[in-house]
Amino acid sequence: MATTIQIQKNTREKLKRLGHKGETYDNIIERLVSYFEELNVEKLIEKRWKKLQEEKEQYVSLDEI
């Protein structure tokens, strides 16, 4: 479902410059939002901790070495 949002012309021009050929404004905005979500430190730490927990069998403790 699509919706209409109002933005200033200069904001639209900035979005155009950030986009790639054939990319919609929705694609551009989604990519930017995803990027900034990744910058959220708490989420980043949580994501990396979860990955470490999932892969912990691959690691050997220093005591075992």
Image (tube, rainbow, N blue to C red):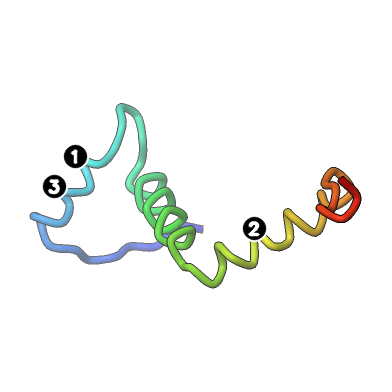
Which quarter of the image is occupied by the C terminus?
Answer: top right
Q: Residue furthest toward the top?
A: 21
Q: Residue at x 13, y 47 (%)?
A: 13
Residue 62: give x, y in percent of width and height: 81, 53
In the rendered image, which residue does mark 2 sit on?
Answer: 48
Residue 54: give x, y in percent of width and height: 82, 54
Type of residue at label 2? Arg
Which of marks 3 and 2 precedes in the sequence? 3
Q: Quadrant of residue 11?
A: bottom left
In the rendered image, which residue does mark 1 sit on?
Answer: 17
Question: Quick check: marks 3 and 1 in contact, CB under 8 Å?
Answer: yes
Front position in the image: 31 or 8: 31
Disc 3 on helix, strand or loop? helix
Type of residue at label 1? Arg
Disc 2 on helix, strand or loop? helix
Q: Residue furthest toward the left?
A: 10
Task: Say left or right for 54 vs 18.
Answer: right
Q: Residue at x 33, y 62 (%)?
A: 4
Task: Say left or right for 24 vs 14.
Answer: right
Front position in the image: 42 or 37: 42
